[in-house]
Amino acid sequence: MLSTIRDFFERNIGGAPAQDPHSIELATAALLVEVMRIDAGTTAAERAAVQRAIRAKFGLAEAETDALIALAEEEMRQATDYYQFTSLINQRFSQAQKERVLELMWRVAYADSVIDAHEQHLMRKIAALLHLPDSAYIAAKLSARDALPE
């Protein structure tokens, strides 16, 4: 798996991830993917929301985004917890960037127009792991909800 990650970054982003096998892009994508897959089923709207979020956050092309999502899905299948992803985000992202990640996660959750209990629980857990206060959690949720098309 590590060689696949290195190959992806060398081929698409111009260099291997910095000493850490879980790059910040992969860690963020993994959390977005987890929102998509945590409820009963993955919808096309949720997948599209993950793709939009990754492209917006990291400025990747469509093929790069799809490759990163595939890697993130594999990482989430093998992961035993979220700490490996959130700890990297805590190290490398500012408070505002972490809040933006949470907002992007909410956008994925809202993509299918239903927030189920699993998604709600995941969002609370990730907000806590990212050391975000309740005010940031609520602001991210409201911002994502307000961004929904009418």
Image: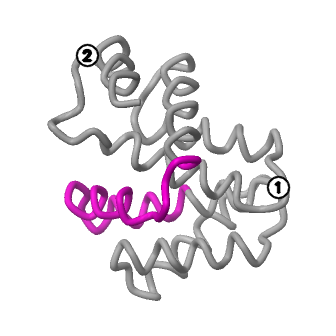
Circle 1 sits in a helix, a strand or a loop, which is it? loop
Q: Position of residue 66 (x, y in %)?
A: 58, 25
Residue 63 magenta: no
Q: Is residue 109 left or right of residue 129?
A: right
Quarter of the rendering containing residue 11:
top left
Residues 127 and 141: in front is 127
Between the residue at mark 1 and the residue at mark 2, the CA separation in whole angstroms equals: 34 Å
Q: Is residue 21 left or right of residue 66?
A: left
The answer to whether marks 1 and 2 mark residues whose Cβ atoms lie closer than 8 Å is no
Q: Residue at x 22, y 20 (%)?
A: 15
Residues 28 and 59: in front is 28
First along the sequence among labels 1 and 2: 2
Q: Which residues are magenta?
A: 76-104
Dot 1 amino acid type: Asp
Name above or below for residue 12 compared with residue 106. above
Q: Is residue 104 left or right of residue 41?
A: left
- What residue did someone put label 1 on? 112
Q: Residue at x 52, y 23 (%)?
A: 67
Density class for disc 2 (Cα within 10 Å; few <14, some 14-19, many ≥20) is: few
Q: Position of residue 95 (x, y in %)?
A: 28, 68
Circle 2 sits in a helix, a strand or a loop, which is it? loop
Q: Residue at x 29, y 63 (%)?
A: 87
Q: Residue at x 58, y 40 (%)?
A: 73
- What residue did someone put label 2 on? 14
